[in-house]
Amino acid sequence: MGKIILKSGADLEAMRSACAVAGKVLDDIIAFIKPGVTTNQVDGFAAERIKFYGGKSAFLGYRKYPCHTCISVNEEVVHGLANERELRFGDIVSVDVGVRYNGFIGDNARTVAVGGCGVLAQRLLDVTEQSLHLGIAAAVSGNRVTDISRAIQDYVEGNGFSVVREFVGHGVGRTMHEEPQIPNFVDRKMDHKLRPGMTIAIEPMVNAGSPDVKILKDGWTVVTRDGSLSAHFEHTVLVTGGEPEILTWLTPSKLKVA
Ligand code: MF3
Ligand code: CO
């Protein structure tokens, strides 16, 4: 277990720029998604955009991960591998992008409907995104990791959905996974106090059915055991003395890139 690395000064500025690039790349990818494109085309487009902004995929080669992004469709939860599958109207697709830039990593993910989707799927997207924002709102100095976890879990379960246990959010900085872990369920074993300068990736993974997941034979793709739909939203967030700062949330003033 490493220790928690607080960011400040030039390191924090570099971290901000890496997160701005990661956010911009994710925006570009989301705009590219439409019925008929294959997930390989989405990953290839992501590779181009990452390069365009001068970054590198933080995922490619990580523990031999073979793609630039994670693209997870419908019952796929996270870590979906790009392939020849064509996205169809009504699918929901999660895109997870980590970019290394200026020596730091920004990590973010979003799930969108391809064209449009059914009522249950849309509610799953809305509840998952809202749970992320409730988790972020709890990421204030003096609170604990479990305050983030509880905000997410209570909202998700209160809406009749479930949170995945096997995968969790994490500190992020010069490396993709730093301390502390940020579970989307209350786990007192992993608790830590939140302090200004912590940069954390908060990433609820929410299933429409049971929380249980399994990994496919490709060694990466995580799917729901019951085949129910799953959604995933992620932001990299800076804990401050006041309001949390969403580093991968693009406001024009932050956009120093293209
Ligand atoms: N956002 C994910 C994470 O934090 C993505 C990692 S994909 C991997 O773990 F391929 F790089 F493992
Ligand atoms: Co992450």
Image (spheres, helix red, strand yellow):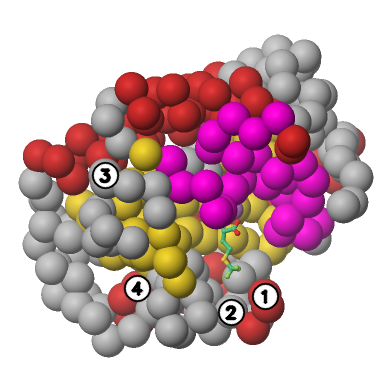
Tag nearer the camera, 4 or 2: 2
How far apart are labels 3 and 1 at the CA level? Answer: 29 Å
Asked if the magenta segment contains residue 164, the reply would be yes
Q: Which residues are magenta?
A: 163-188
Q: Do labels 2 and 1 touch, CB within 8 Å?
A: yes
Rendered residue at 80%/24% (across/down)? 193
Circle 3 SS class: loop
**Can the viewer see residue 234?**
no
**Disc 2 target residue:** 65
Position of 230 with respect to 90 (left or right) is right
| Crowd band around label 1 with a 10 angstrom C-alpha radius: few (<14), some (14–19), many (20+) | few
**Disc 4 target residue:** 42
Q: Is mark 2 within 8 Å of ligand 1?
A: yes
Task: From this view, report whether residue 57 is shown above or below residue 30.
Answer: below
Q: Is mark 1 within 8 Å of ligand 1?
A: yes
Q: Quadrant of ligand 1?
A: bottom right
